[in-house]
Amino acid sequence: MDGFSHSTDVRVRFAETDAQGIAHHASFVVWLEVARVAYLDEHAGGYRSIRDRGLEALTTEVHLRYHRAASFDDLLTVWTRCTGLRGARFRYEYRIVRGNELVAEGYTSHATVHRGTYHPTRVPDWLADAIARAESQEA
Amino acid sequence: MDGFSHSTDVRVRFAETDAQGIAHHASFVVWLEVARVAYLDEHAGGYRSIRDRGLEALTTEVHLRYHRAASFDDLLTVWTRCTGLRGARFRYEYRIVRGNELVAEGYTSHATVHRGTYHPTRVPDWLADAIARAESQEA
Amino acid sequence: MDGFSHSTDVRVRFAETDAQGIAHHASFVVWLEVARVAYLDEHAGGYRSIRDRGLEALTTEVHLRYHRAASFDDLLTVWTRCTGLRGARFRYEYRIVRGNELVAEGYTSHATVHRGTYHPTRVPDWLADAIARAESQEA
Amino acid sequence: MDGFSHSTDVRVRFAETDAQGIAHHASFVVWLEVARVAYLDEHAGGYRSIRDRGLEALTTEVHLRYHRAASFDDLLTVWTRCTGLRGARFRYEYRIVRGNELVAEGYTSHATVHRGTYHPTRVPDWLADAIARAESQEA
């Protein structure tokens, strides 16, 4: 997908549906996280490599716009890119598609903090560089 | 809280925390829903009364901004108001506080649809009136 | 309820339902945890008081038998008792009712461990005593 | 694995962890369901093929014994077999492993019901046959 450097597939679990007969809207928030973890796996040694250095990436903002319902067992693709890295902050943008249909789109914002204290700390250079490389490959 | 017509208390469940030691950001999305259900309980006969008429309220947009982490067992208050009702669409705004601290704020957008077909349909008058009454009481 | 020393009310959240139109069976596992936390709140200073001493209670076994479906917005009561405390281990038993109807019943087993290392450690005396008092009051 | 006809891989999501730093015990219940869906995908046209015929498989019992903690990003394999099909009832057994380590084991019981009424109905022959074939292949 134009401008997106990474994709992850997610299949809708039965536990993720609700009594409206479709995937619950909070399930999408979890899928965005699954996509971020896959993004970091591919480009920066995984989220584990961030945690292993005593850091966490807190989520400071979530936005999702739902265009179509998703159903049990649907195969969705989450397109993901990382943007706007500055200081302790960075942001991901997403498009969730089912085949050619746009199901949802959104973004999340994050801040790197020290584990334990939750004090903000600059995104480490190795991670900023890995993200810059990932996103420039795409362009 | 100024401008908010309704509040609901939520206690953070252990299952809602994650390995960062705090409430997972997707848990907040569920709490907003709990608050909407409580709002409709107080003002419009409950979400059940909507479903009993063959309607569903789909969630079309979610936005959350997280200001402070919430921990296991924290008592949070979700302040809620309903705004911008027009045609099939309406919107809720939220402030989540812990005592005097603002923990998160956000909004969600919704569309009323026919159950089964998911076709949009005007918010029924009884519901629009109930919301108008609820929000004018507040003012 | 005969032989049960504690009860907690839970209202079924919309997010806890699934496309079968009923509460998802995994939701009950979370409600048992909510009931344990409420039990400890009443009798032993809360689960926080265990964590504050550097301990965790791991769940080592879960059993649930489902007798009736639960629906969105149902008010359920989880009856809870703590039994079989020995060494590092203890067990809870549950009955989940809706009015006079038995909805589900089950038990969970637990082991106290040191936080961080996850090494088993005897249930501390203050907690064993608090549980013994709670359960003898009931009898 | 001896006696098990099917396996499914699951990677522990961050949202599935809790403040103990490990996968929450209720997450395992969802993974068993993911494994059942994968089992039916391989052997019986998927759970969708059951629902498309107006049936649902209710879960009537869950049992899990946890031997080791699972952590974020762990790759787990859920070994699954279907046993004890009789009338409207059937049962699955599971072993969850991480490499050579047994992480958890359990079983779930189910009943086929008519969608909408939830009345029990015999497991249809095509499904019973598909399961019999799957399990005899294994032996």
Image (cartoon, coloured by chain):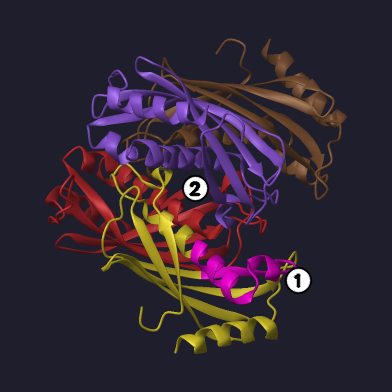
Chain colours: A purple, B brown, C red, D yellow
Compared across the picture, whether D20 is left or right of D12 comes to: left
Quarter of the figure with residue B39? top right
Question: Residue placed at 37% from the left, 55% from the top?
Answer: D25
Q: Chain of mark 1?
A: D
Q: Would residue D34 be seen by someone viewing this image from the given angle?
A: yes
Q: Position of residue C8 (x, y in %)?
A: 45, 49
Which numbered disc covers residue A112?
Answer: none
Q: Amino acid at mark 1?
A: Arg
Say which quadrant the C terminus of chain D sits in: bottom left
Q: Return the residue at label 2.
A: C9
Q: Residues within 10 Å of mark 1 (few under 14, many from 20)?
A: few
Q: Residues within 10 Å of mark 2 (few under 14, many from 20)?
A: some
Chain letter of the residue beneath label 2 in the structure image: C
Of the 4 image quadrants, the one containing the N terminus of chain D is bottom left
Q: Secondary structure at mark 1?
A: loop
Q: Nearer the viewer, residue D42 or A22?
A: D42
Of residues B71 and D4, the one drawn nearer to the viewer in this rendering: D4
Q: Is residue C74 visible?
A: no
| The residue stretch that appears in magenta | D33-60
- Real-space Cα separation, disc 1 to disc 2, in angstroms: 37 Å
Give the foreground label among 1 and 2. Answer: 1
Mark 2: which amino acid?
Asp
Name the residue beneath numbered marker 1: D53
Q: Which residue is painted at 72% across and 21% down in the image?
A: B134
Displayed quadrant of residue C2? bottom left
> Whole-percent x and y of residue D8?
45, 66
Q: Secondary structure at mark 2?
A: strand
Instruction: Residue D34: say if magenta.
Output: yes
Relative to D39, is C50 above or below? above
User: Please, what is the dominant secondary structure of the magenta stretch?
Assistant: helix
* Residue B35 to residue C63: above or below: above
The percent coordinates of residue A51 (x first, y second) are 27, 36
